[in-house]
Every structure is written in structure tokens, then in C-alpha cells.
Image: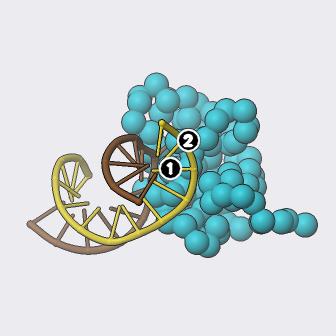
Chain colours: A cyan, B brown, C yellow
Amino acid sequence: MIDIQKKTTYERIYAIIRMIPKGKVATYGLIAQIEGTCTPRMVGYALSNAKQELELPWHRVINSSGRISLKEPESVDLQRTLLLSEGVVFTGDKVNLKMFLWRP
DNA sequence: CAGTTGACAAGTA
DNA sequence: TTACTTGCCAACT
């Protein structure tokens, strides 16, 4: 049973991100489509405001090109490491979305 | 109430 | 292939 009667748009986005299964990734656009009322940008904005206490699997969210969208190289490397530990394979700097994109 | 601040995506050259 | 442009909108000061 899933109640999507959250307070804010951001919280709905967080709830969707928590649904992403281990070993899969989701794009910002996909999350926006699932949420239904927001744009891909809102997803990124929501994550940037997200706090670590929420325990979000933020590393499973990447952009539509299959690349990590963070700006700081250290964070990018961390995200890639986390995904690799879950079995997501990188081809160069890109993830093969054909194989690892989460299909709800 | 107004200004600021952001993890995007699609199109163009 | 990369670099640049435009459209998009909530939450926080």
C-alpha cells in the first residue's frame, strides 16, 4: 500500500527514489515521470536539498545520458564506487542504461 | 512578497 | 563528439 499524500513535492520524489532496487539505476526524467507532476529539474533540486538522515539511495540516480551528474569529481567517484559495489557496470564514464535502467 | 538557488533534458551547431 | 541555449519549478531566505 503506498500513500502518496506527502507534504511536499520533494518528499514524493524521495519516496520514489527509495523504491529503486539495488543493482538498478533511475534517471531524473524517469523519476519525474513517475512522480507525475514535476520536471526532471525538480528531482535534481530535491536531491541537492536532501539530507543524509533520509538515507536515500541517491547514488542510483543518474542523468539521461547514463552519466553521473554531480559537479565535484570526488562525489562522482564516490557514486561510481557505490554503484559498482551493487553490480552496476560502467562503460568508461557511462552506465549502460539498456541493462541497468530501473523499469517500474 | 521578491530574490536566490539548484544532481536535468532536448535541441542546435 | 563536445559546448552552448532554452524551458522548467519548488523550497528557502
For disc 1, the chain is A
Say whether marks 1 and 2 touch (CB < 8 Å). Answer: yes
**Residue A75, percent from left and from top:** 49, 30
| Viewport quadrant of the C terminus of chain A | bottom right
Residue A35 percent coordinates (x, y): 64, 67
Q: What is the number of the mark on residue A45? A: 1
Residue A50 seen by the camera: yes
State the SS at label 2: helix
Residue occupying image coordinates x 56% and y 35%: A79
Which of A32/A51 is in front?
A: A51
Crowding at mark 1 (Cα within 10 Å: few <14, some 14-19, many 20+): few
Residue A89 in picture, x, y percent from top left? 58, 44
Above or below, comparing residue A44 to residue A31 in the picture = above
Amino acid type at mark 2? Asn
Amino acid bearing label 1: Tyr
Residue A17 appears in view: no
Residue that carries the numbered disc 2 in the rendered image: A49
